[in-house]
Image (spheres, rainbow, N blue to C red):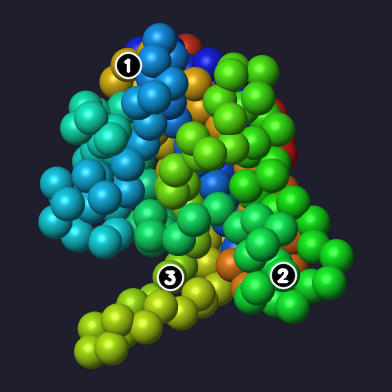
Amino acid sequence: MAFLLSRGETLTVTDPIGEQVADLLAFRRDDVDEAISSGRSLDYAGRLFLTTGAAIYSNRSNVLLRIVEDTVGRHDFLLTPCSADTFRILYGDEHPHQGCFGNLSVALAPFGIVPDRIPVAFNIFMNVVVNAETGVLRVAPPLSRAGDHITFRAEIDLIVALTACSAPQSNNYAFKPIDYAIGMAECRPRSSSL
């Protein structure tokens, strides 16, 4: 789904069962050409794994989100949202489903964001292991357990899209729900489930 997140509001994404990935996108509300940027965020942080205190930068080097709490500490910002092509090429599916990319595209369409504008997602709870010698990437089971969560604070007014991931390897070959809540630090968040 996609929704508005205003400056100062928090978004908490919770894994209620464990080992479930969620893909997150964010766009500047008043100019959707500005979106989260894996390259800028990782470059400015100087590390691959972003956690509490880290900023999620835009393609224009503005901070869109800041991670204010994280009980897992391992998320991916390298791999693109899975798509029908992902399932065709990597998994050999003859009739693939739309995957995260398709889910995010449908959710963002009412905001005028077309599929070609979708960047690399912040893959919450995704555990991508990078071999330091060869650079080979391996998707391992998520480290998240029941009740683990990550909380972001919006630094500007945003359009946010979120989907539970449907790539088998990313979720240790079992698909589960993802919960989320929007609120302010001093207010009770409104909650929902994907």
Report the amino acid beneath label 2.
Answer: Arg
Front-most of 106 and 192? 106
For residue 144, side relative to residue 38 (left or right):
right
In the picture as drawn, the residue positioned furthest to the front comes out as: 116
In this rendering, the label closer to the viewer, 3 or 2: 2
Residue at x-position 85% and y-position 65%: 95
Q: Would residue 147 be seen by someone viewing this image from the given angle?
A: no
Q: How far across and how far down the image is residue 90, in percent? A: 64, 75
Q: Name the residue under label 2.
A: 88
Report the amino acid beneath label 3.
Answer: Val
Residue at x-position 74% and y-position 51%: 98
82 to 54, vertically: above or below: below
For residue 117, side relative to residue 59 (left or right):
right
Which numbered disc flags the more N-terminal residue, 2 or 1? 2
Which numbered disc flags the more N-terminal residue, 1 or 3? 3
Q: Could you say whether the residue bearing mark 3 is in a helix, strand or loop?
A: strand
Q: Mark 3 points at which residue?
A: 128
Residue at x-position 38% and y-position 60%: 78
Q: Could you say whether the residue bearing mark 1 is in a helix, strand or loop?
A: loop
Mark 2 → mark 1, Cα distance in angstroms: 37 Å
Report the amino acid beneath label 1.
Answer: Ile
For residue 6, side relative to residue 180 (left or right):
left
Q: Find residue 133 and report its image quarter.
A: bottom left
Q: Name the residue under label 1.
A: 156
Q: How far across and how far down the image is residue 87, in percent? A: 70, 67
Quarter that holds the N terminus: top right
Q: Would residue 73 be seen by someone viewing this image from the given angle?
A: yes
Residue at x-position 30% and y-position 81%: 135
Front-most of 146 and 40? 40
